[in-house]
Amino acid sequence: MIVDEILVLKEVSYKENDKILHVLSRTRGKIQLISKGAKKSNSHLINASQLFAYSKCYMTVSRDMYIITSADLIDNFYNLKNNMDAFFNGNYILELIGFVAQENEVDFRIFDMTVSVLHFLSTMSKDFDKLTAAYELKLVSMLGYKPDFRHCITCGNEINENSKFSIKDGGLLCPDCVNSGSGINVTYSEILTMEKILKTKFESIGSIEVNQKILQIIRNFLFYYIGKDNFTTLKLL
Ligand SMILES: [Zn+2]
């Protein structure tokens, strides 16, 4: 018997009464599970077998396939469904992590952060775009592309004025080095804001003033390093 925490990223109908769940697991990375009888209204697996379900799951393995035997729902982020904006952001997070996460590649920090951002998307009444941007920036940093908001990537000098942010080079270019690479003009205040987004916990994200340009830079930065920008759920946002 295997016990793990799982988050359902995608549910696929299988046979008459079953579902195949694509899940992010806390200690096994992205895996697929068979949830037998999950489509029946009296199934004890019904709650844990829905999109967004986060549960403690008991499973066995048979021929490389995980099979759920029982599950205790921890949260289903139900309130996401009460706000379209929160719901679309939540769907985008699932699609994003479904793309980024690899089978058997374990990073429980990413799992915990994903559950956490869904929690705040479902309990806060605004700032969904800021929450998502914070998730994107923290995620790309955990993947190994953490931008240094304090130093120039070329000369190493401390940044304390307007500079350029180069997505391709992964950081800031000070005024002396702007000619050595291309980038987006950012004010010192915008630089400090991006650093704050990276360091602030989700629950305090509402206190940061964020403009559209910063949201776009963060998203483009993430997309550049994960090598994908055409997420279906983004068309809904
Ligand atoms: Zn420099």
Image (cartoon, rainbow, N blue to C red):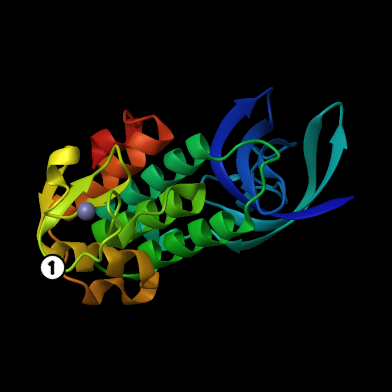
Which of 219 and 190 lies nearest the eye of the viewer? 190
Q: Is residue 180 above or below residue 158?
A: above
User: Residue 86 appears in which quarter of the rendering?
Assistant: bottom left
Side of 212 where 120 appears, left or right: right
Residue at image point 66% right, 54% down: 26
User: Dot 1: within a 10 Å radius of its alpha carbon, few (fewer than 14), some, or many (20 or more) residues?
Assistant: few
The tally of labels here is: 1
Residue found farthest to the top: 15
Residue 216 in percent (x, y) is at: 20, 46
Residue at image point 49% right, 54% down: 142
Residue at image point 63% right, 37% down: 21
Residue 223 in percent (x, y) is at: 34, 37
Side of 47 where 135 appears, left or right: left
Residue 8 in percent (x, y) is at: 57, 45
Disc 1 element: helix
Which of 99 and 76 lies nearest the eye of the viewer? 99
**Residue position marked by numbered label 1 in the rendering:** 189
Q: Is residue 73 above or below residue 233?
A: below
Whether residue 127 is visible, yes or no, is: no
Whether residue 209 is visible, yes or no, is: yes
Quarter holding the C terminus? top left
Q: Is residue 231 above or below residue 45?
A: above
Q: Is residue 215 above or below residue 182?
A: below
Q: Amino acid at mark 1?
A: Ser
Q: Does the Cβ of the disc 1 residue fall within 8 Å of ligand 1?
A: no
Which of 94 and 70 lies nearest the eye of the viewer? 94
Residue 236 in percent (x, y) is at: 25, 38
